[in-house]
Amino acid sequence: MADSKLLPSPGGDPVAVETLLQDVFGIVVDEAIRKGTSASEKVCDWKEPEELKQLLDLELQSQGESQEQILERCRAVIRYSVKTGHPRFFNQLFSGLDPHSLAGRIITESLNTSPYTYEIAPVFVLMEEEVLKKLRALVGWSSGDGVFCPGGSISNMYAINLARYQRYPDCKQRGLRALPPLALFTSKECHYSINKGAAFLGLGTDSVRVVKADERGKMIPEDLERQISLAEAEGAVPFLVSATSGTTVLGAFDPLDAIADVCQRHGLWLHVDAAWGGSVLLSQTHRHLLDGIQRADSVAWNPHKLLAAGLQCSALLLQDTSNLLKRCHGFQASYLFPQDKFYDVALDTGDKVVQCGRRVDCLKLWLMWKAQGGQGLEQRIDQAFALARYLVEEIKKREGFELVMEPEFVNVCFWLLSPSLWGKQASPHYSQRLSQVAPVLKERMVKEGSMMIGYQPHGSHGNFFRMVVANPTLTCADIDFLLNELERLGQDL
Amino acid sequence: MADSKLLPSPGGDPVAVETLLQDVFGIVVDEAIRKGTSASEKVCDWKEPEELKQLLDLELQSQGESQEQILERCRAVIRYSVKTGHPRFFNQLFSGLDPHSLAGRIITESLNTSPYTYEIAPVFVLMEEEVLKKLRALVGWSSGDGVFCPGGSISNMYAINLARYQRYPDCKQRGLRALPPLALFTSKECHYSINKGAAFLGLGTDSVRVVKADERGKMIPEDLERQISLAEAEGAVPFLVSATSGTTVLGAFDPLDAIADVCQRHGLWLHVDAAWGGSVLLSQTHRHLLDGIQRADSVAWNPHKLLAAGLQCSALLLQDTSNLLKRCHGFQASYLFPQDKFYDVALDTGDKVVQCGRRVDCLKLWLMWKAQGGQGLEQRIDQAFALARYLVEEIKKREGFELVMEPEFVNVCFWLLSPSLWGKQASPHYSQRLSQVAPVLKERMVKEGSMMIGYQPHGSHGNFFRMVVANPTLTCADIDFLLNELERLGQDL
């Protein structure tokens, strides 16, 4: 009787499965990879939201669709998506398409597992540890711990949670009400995830004490000292400093050695948010920007940004060798982590994290590293610095462009002065008019699909462009294009 | 001078890129898809950790490797990985390989974007909203909000954070110290992420009040009432009840209507952790198990489990229409979310989440749904229930098998009594000896690679097997194999 209810098994025809996947892969190669990285194609095919909804026919119905319809849908999804691997996509801290990383991601998806136990992810449990070990070695640590997190924001939260747990292990059970008021310190240039994290973790954004930064965006250690005294005078207990290596807009590197001195004097956990700048550790030429990072307690580093490892690849690295991660986050669920397994359960990573299932984020980085070698990756970093320098020199040569400041990283911040603004620096409303240029140009470039670059106001400055040199295939020609295209788009303003 | 430092651009040869990806995709099809889902191949090729490290040669070097070496590495990674799409992988709450979902995941990886702004993810911002709308409709809501999170644990945390923010908006800024002691309620059968979440969010695990469950694992609403009174008497402020639809081990569904009544009486936020059971909402026949879910404030639902959408696909759904998500999590970072954009910035989802970049998790589910239709997905759910029922009937027929309890879902919990235990139920040490059977069989099946199924102790019960019928391609033959293989593996015990 039970048997009679059984339906024919759906979707189990291996030939049909392979044919579908071959067809889709063909579309991916044609549309996302070949066209998606070709300078002669658009970086995006802009549609207004209402029109795009119609084009995509998003609604989910009761009836399934034919293979032909599904393939057409795949084409449409790619067609109307922004091509982040395109040589004129400069909009984000990630860009470019690394083929080995993509290969690793496709394998990851086909294997569809979670690295919480050695049992179901033997390769990835070992691989994750090896990759983390390599990243730690670049930080300067011969031992330690770590884990891949779903993004830098969560890596930063982990650091805050670990720091407070290390100081007040009671917190895990009894919560923050059992603790004195806590204070953590970061510069005004820090990533907003520090504030989001403080709120999420129950500390509240008031617990984040903002330290002044200099005109380049670097934390001022003397002001850190002052903020610590101030917090203490107000009855708060300082417990963590979050320094930034590579700020989001200006690309600034906080002076880690001086900050580590302060942390050492006050017994504070030093976290370095190197989500953006961490990859510079691969470059012998430029890694001095992170001097002192080996003195940190924790480091967040996102190879999905400058190394183009693919979203997401975010490592939280720890100097700790006392199993702090597992003690802080563990809950010993007997169904997933029974202790009578036939292998060493210390390999199971599940209790290092606050997630249960989590994605495999190591293979894409590992495979890319195997293919390029540390030297190949170092060359990419050096290339990005050199191209950023080329851009700076070109900006200086051209009338109508003005640097916000000399960059020390691959963020290059600048204004385009449209012709009507030339020579008008002293006129009233100049700043306001300058600030209106970027949004107009942005709209124009996106609607034409020629290029994408971000802009933002910052501090006392009105809107300026932030160029990010991250795509490993960029050349001087792409940089020239950027400047020519901005001139063209703004010539009538 | 700057120019002279520039190196030839690495990895930019389009033909080489395509060739590599075609080769890797061929390996994926052969090894992960064809062999990985074939019953005549092993589900895993077990190696001890030290041996596997040698086989994989994990170390990352300075020198890159040849294309041939890289392809060999791809083969090795797949060879030694567990095949979670294999018809004899019963180990987790996810299994099976849906080709349309995998197609969606490959496209997602090739496009490599983050849905935080419409600007760089126009298709996925609209698609995510449409998919969430559909999931909400199945819950029973015609409006609301939601977001995809990196796993059910984080979805559950979001619910807890939203509930406390709604009651005490001050918390975001001033932290938990400004609040009275809070209490949340969940049954002893809840997922461990509730406890992990309470610790992470600064509430502490003491804030989690454990409600009794009946012998089937369902929360007892009368005990919930009692725990609320108890917490109040101790000076705590109850704010949230987390009910579970589909517990991890027993597959139990809490009585949502009765729990909603309690929540209504006390003005508590009702969260339903339907990470596992949520997909049952697609079945007209079985959705009564979640009766009352429409009265929840929030629901966590992971289509990556029973719907085989691929890790990870976890939706947090909200009944709220007051923009609670953005108010609770937003930080209005001007660099990412300037307000002078040329499109409606209300489309940008970035301030709904505590992450910054996040993965696109909607396409795989959307494409699978388009291909199967709601009817096709419903058929899968019904099929899983029918196969679980078939398994139960077979267990009852066979000597040497004993059900832990009659299941109401697709988790089937049972003991294998090895021959030496037959008829010895009354003997001393029987329970202890029975408990030793599962670990021995598990080791044997994994080392042979014939099958993978999980076991655990639970409550007063010693180790038993937990079969999960989740792979959509399973047939009665696979169920027969499971039982036959357990008999074979245990015949000498």
Image (tube, coloured by chain):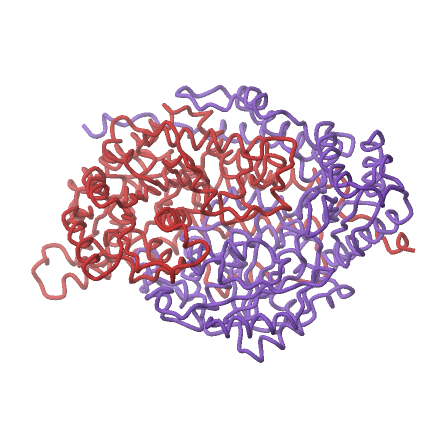
Chain colours: A purple, B red
Q: Residue B67, image x and y in percent?
A: 70, 48
Q: Residue at x 18, y 50 (%)?
A: B224
The residue furthest front is A428
Q: Nearer the viewer, residue A430 or B469?
A: A430
Q: Nearer the viewer, residue A381 or A239?
A: A239
* Quarter that holds the C terminus of chain A: top right
Q: Is residue A323 left or right of residue A424?
A: left
Q: Residue A225, image x and y in percent?
A: 61, 74
The residue furthest bottom is A265
Residue A118 seen: no
Q: Is residue B339 left or right of residue B403?
A: right
Q: Residue A147, image x and y in percent?
A: 51, 60
Q: Choose top left, top right, bottom left or bottom right for residue A131.
A: bottom right
The residue furthest left is B426
Q: Nearer the viewer, residue A173 or B324?
A: B324
Q: Residue at x 38, y 25 (%)?
A: B374
Residue A103 seen: yes
Q: Residue A57, image x and y in percent?
A: 52, 21
* Quarter that holds the N terminus of chain A: top left
